[in-house]
Image (cartoon, coloured by chain):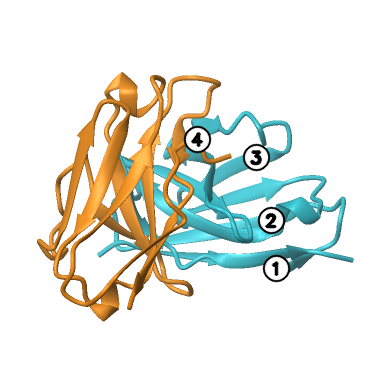
């Protein structure tokens, strides 16, 4: 059974770079797209972007200028970097597998942007 | 940036039937793109509930059902149980503005 686990700092200072990693276990890493999604406080879910095994990416236009998603196939991990963060980037960040729909998901990691 | 609209809250007594609507537009649901539904209990991983409008993954009770018509979709929960108290999100694909995947605003289901 495929499982995903997010990891990374829970606190990031304004103007700095948010960096998170999602580790995939249980197989199928090469067969799907892998996605980052975030839930802003009191709001719904927002798709950030996704990447496939070969490194092909798609990004949400609203975040594209600040987002980089990369993949580490040897460790079956993919990562998110979001630059120049502000308090508006405070959110629960989730990773998920994309194969027509998002399934499964990680539990998410809360990232707070504050000095 | 939710482009799919859901009611903020839905409630019902145990055993009742509740429905959650998901209203989109001609660039997403109305364009024929499939709708998927997720259940999220805070602190846990969101769970796929319905895929491709009306299909349940293995392990999801048949109390949950989905439908799509025109620019909208809906999720129905029959025989409401206390464990169904959670947040529910619809999701589809959107062909405009380069935003591939869009979610609903989310609905909190409360079991009275």
Report helix, strand or loop for mark 1: loop
Mark 3: secondary structure: strand
Which residue is located at x 47 percent, y 72 percent?
A: B42
- Label 4, secondary structure: give it: loop
Q: Which mark is residue B3?
A: 4
Question: Which numbered circle lies on residue A68?
Answer: 3
Disc tally is 4
Q: Are marks 2 and 1 in contact (CB under 8 Å)?
A: yes
Write down the residue under mark 1: A9
Q: Residue at x 25, y 75 (%)?
A: B13
Q: Position of residue A83 (x, y in %)?
A: 77, 45
Quickly name the residue at label 2. A19
Task: Sort mark 4 into few (<14), some (14-19) or many (20+) by Cα contacts within 10 Å.
Answer: some
Q: Earlier in the sequence, mark 3 or mark 2?
A: 2
Q: Position of residue B2 (x, y in %)?
A: 52, 41
Seen from the viewer's position, the closer of residues A79 and A106 is A106
Q: Which chain is cyan?
A: A
Disc 4 to disc 3, C-alpha distance: 24 Å
Q: Check the residue under mark 1 and report the chain it is in.
A: A
Label 3 – label 2 distance at C-alpha: 10 Å
């Amino acid at each position: 059974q495929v499982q995903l686990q997010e990891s990374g700092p829970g606190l990031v200072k304004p103007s700095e770079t948010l960096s998170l990693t999602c580790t995939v276990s249980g197989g199928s890493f090469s067969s799907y797209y892998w996605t980052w999604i975030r839930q802003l406080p009191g709001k719904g879910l927002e798709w950030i972007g996704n990447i496939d095994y070969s490194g092909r990416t798609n990004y949400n236009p609203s975040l594209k200028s600040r987002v980089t998603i990369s993949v580490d196939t040897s460790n079956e991990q993919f990562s998110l970097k979001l630059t120049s963060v502000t308090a508006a980037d405070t959110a629960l960040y989730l990773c998920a597998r994309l194969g027509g729909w998002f399934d499964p998901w990680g539990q998410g990691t809360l990232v707070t942007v504050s000095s | 940036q939710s482009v799919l609209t859901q009611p903020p809250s839905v409630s019902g007594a145990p055993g009742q039937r509740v429905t959650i609507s998901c209203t989109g537009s001609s660039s997403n649901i109305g364009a024929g793109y499939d709708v998927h539904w997720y259940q999220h209990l805070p602190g846990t991983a969101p769970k796929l509930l319905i895929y491709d409008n009306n299909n349940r993954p293995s392990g999801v009770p048949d109390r949950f059902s989905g439908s799509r018509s025109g620019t909208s979709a809906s999720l129905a929960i029959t025989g409401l149980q206390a464990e169904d108290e959670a947040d529910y999100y619809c999701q589809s694909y959107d062909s405009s503005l380069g935003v591939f995947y869009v979610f609903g605003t989310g609905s909190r289901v409360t079991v009275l």
